[in-house]
Amino acid sequence: MSVIGCGYLGAVHAAAMASLGHDVVGIDVDEGKVADLTAGAAPFFEPGLAELLEDGVRSGRLRFAADPAAASGSEVHFLAVGTPQSDSGPAADLRFVDAAIDGLLPHLRPGAVVAGKSTVPVGTAARLARRIAESGATLVWNPEFLREGWAVHDTLRPDRLVVGAEDSPQGAAAVDLLRRVYAAAIDAGSPFLVTDLATAELVKGAANAFLATKISFINAMAEVAEAAGADVTLLAEALGHDSRIGRRYLGSGIGFGGGCLPKDIRAFAARAEELGRGQSVSFLHEVDAINLRRRDRAVRLVVDALGGLVFGRRIAVLGAAFKPFSDDVRDSPALEVAVRLRGLGADVLVTDPAAIENARARHPQLGYAASRDDALRDADAVVVVTEWDEYRRELTPQHAGGLVRGRIVIDGRNCLDAEAWRAAGWTYRGMGRR
Ligand code: UDX
């Protein structure tokens, strides 16, 4: 099989498929990335990936190439290129998807299967199916639901596998081929759902829309709780015991970011608009707005806690990644809070166990500290914006208190034990907590 596009999704998919015994070539236009992957080096922080890459390359089942011709001879071609937000608006930019198909077309043989994994606006698969029809290959849509930090697990043991195909003998044969590709996961209990092309594309968009809505729901409750003198973390716990609601994705704080949820809900709404159903998902604009307000709110809490002015004050920002177990800073709410505080004239020192280099590349104007304790030293206030264990579990208020100048902590992820910090003499402010 070939995997076209070796970014987050593709690199993990290629390595995971090789670990299952498949013969895999990963293809990417970026020669540097191809060289790194060939050397077994993971291009980003992802637990378990480096081991899979090394094993795969050593076994000879996994190789990487920059030339699309390396795809010829594969029975199945996974399309795993990125679909970023377009420069001109909320819609997805499909440039890389179309370029991947352009590169693949001369190497497609009759009977081959092209399995789209990229997150695309509904209707894209049908269009791509028409583009490849002449080659005699068949297109199916097989969306990917992996979470960063859990990517290897999510690829090898997904919650569900979804394959969308056209209702034809070729479509059925392509579905059977994917069933064989994923036999290990299916045997281990992952449900395998067969749909039409449009439904498969929609599942992905709808899943992300739902998750984003759930997070913004609890953050909206945080706004209300704040005004009412209630505590959103207790509220979430109580709601979560209702099995119809569930506790997951009810984590309140500075909201969601990353390379997927923010852009995917915008692209989803934009596509619905094109389909004449903008009203059906107009709530997603509110979901986005609630989410972005959380960043303002965190900045406001810091400013208020420092008496209305942050100019010249030293602020330790614990976290830069959009979530723990990731070095990804794309649309990171953590980093945005740091940037805004810097914009207000604060002397910001950002630290993160994994994401400092990526953060520095995007925001060289910020101050960076290599360690948590270096960031804390002489700080007038501490802001926790990514809930790494190093901050959430391992940092005690006593230890931090011995380093800082001012015992003020703003818990942007509601991940600290408020009582313990207060008992140690800290002014503690959470997001939507008393
Ligand atoms: C997400 C989806 O989970 C995944 O299925 C899809 O394929 C891609 O997008 P990912 O971007 O890796 O995956 O991140 P996720 O773990 O879902 O977290 C997204 C953001 O939401 C993070 O910034 C996280 O901090 C935030 N979040 C998550 C909350 O603010 N509260 C929560 O309760 C959960």
Image: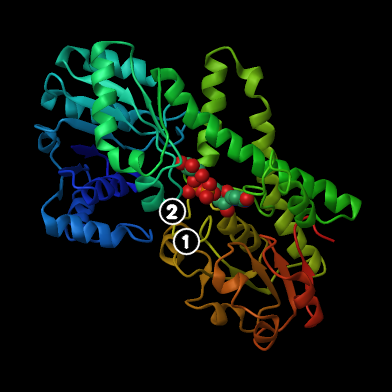
Q: Which residue is mark 2?
A: 150
Residue type, label 2: Trp
- Residue drawn 66% across the image and 81% down it: 396
Left or right of 327? Residue 386 is right
Residue 340 appears left or right of 100:
right
**Residue 8 placed where, x, y %?**
35, 48
Amino acid identity at mark 1:
Phe
Image quadrant where residue 9 sits:
top left
Query: Residue 188 in the image: x percent, y percent?
Result: 37, 44
Give the left or right position of residue 85, taking residue 405 as reference: left
Mark 2 and mark 1 lie on one chain; the one further toward the N terminus is 2
Residue 19 coordinates in the image, percent (x, y): 23, 51
State yes or no: Cβ of the residue under disc 2 lies below 8 Å from any atom of ligand 1: yes
Judged by depth in the image, the label closer to the viewer, 2 or 1, is 2
Asked whether the beta carbons under mark 2 and mark 1 sit within 8 Å of each other, the answer is yes
Q: Residues within 10 Å of mark 2 (few under 14, many from 20)?
A: some
Q: Secondary structure at mark 1?
A: loop
Q: Position of residue 252 (x, y in %)?
A: 69, 52
For image coordinates 19% across by 51% down, the residue present is: 34
Pointer 1: what residue? Answer: 325
SS type, badge 2 = loop
